[in-house]
Amino acid sequence: MNWMDRLERKLGRFAVPHVMVFVTGIMLAVSAGDLLFGGRVSAMLAFSRALILRGQVWRLFTFIFLPPSTSILWIVFSLYFYCLMGSALESAWGTFRFNLFYLCGILGCILAGFLTGYGMNHFLNMSLFFAYAAVYPENQLMLFFILPIKVKWLALVDVLYFLWMFIVGGWPSRVAILLALVNIWLFFGGDFFRHIRQQAGYWKTRQQFRRNNRF
């Protein structure tokens, strides 16, 4: 039994079902509020280390609900995609484990915000896609509702995007990327390193076989 199993046995009853529906619903409401009040709703919810230390503690978590864009079309597309991925991962893992995955990402973003003074949810939401691609690599999505493409190829594009942002971004962006992906390492790091060891063992076996069969 691993640490996730032990946590689920103790805390599983507190899991919140359909958490991404809840999160994206609030994002949609924030977007509507920004349209009505000229962006002031997002300004009240954004992460600010200085304001948190002055007592505005709600900013520790409310930055999670900031919409991904100011474009209505992109907001609708992104929120639909978040719901799709969240529901699929919750179906594959169960409610508790998906809650744990998202919570670990949130805590990573909060830590990055305190270390750098700049907190954002962009890379957290992108981590959902990495997890989705790891669980459903062969699934096909309709990009922009038109172009069919497999999830694994979109994930490769996202990897290149993250690498590019890590290279050209400042230290706040680099720290945010690393800590927002702590959930990926917790959930998939073990499988990744096992795969590397298996491939290394296979390569050594093949090399040994070739040496032993030389004439």
Image: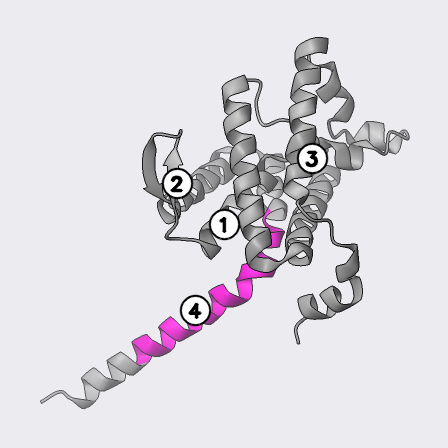
Q: Earlier in the sequence, mark 2 or mark 3?
A: 3
Q: Earlier in the sequence, mark 4 or mark 2?
A: 2
Indicate the amino acid at tag 1: Tyr
| Number of the front mark, 1 or 3 | 1
Residue 165, position as x, y percentages in the image: 49, 36
Structural distance between the alpha carbons of marks 1 and 3: 19 Å
Q: Are marks 4 and 2 in contact (CB under 8 Å)?
A: no
Q: Earlier in the sequence, mark 1 or mark 3?
A: 3
Which structural element holds mark 4? Answer: helix
| Number of the front mark, 4 or 1 | 1
Up/down of 9 relative to 56, above or below: below
Compare residues 167 and 31 and report the one nearer the observer: 31
Neighbourhood count class around disc 1 (C-alpha, 10 Å): few under 14, some 14–19, many 20 upward: many
Q: Earlier in the sequence, mark 4 or mark 3?
A: 3
Structural distance between the alpha carbons of marks 4 and 2: 26 Å
| Number of the front mark, 2 or 1 | 2
Quadrant assignment for the N terminus: bottom right
**Residue 113: in sight, yes or no?**
yes
Indicate the amino acid at tag 2: Leu
**Residue 38: in sight, yes or no?**
no
Q: Earlier in the sequence, mark 2 or mark 1?
A: 1
At horizontal 37% and vertical 52% (from top left) the residue drawn is: 138
The residue under label 3 is: 64
The residue under label 4 is: 195
Here the colouring is: one colour
The residue under label 1 is: 132
- Name the image quarter holding residue 58: top right
| Number of the front mark, 4 or 3 | 3
Residue 64, position as x, y percentages in the image: 69, 35
Q: Which residues are magenta?
A: 181-204
Structural distance between the alpha carbons of marks 4 and 3: 33 Å
Q: Which mark is residue 141?
A: 2
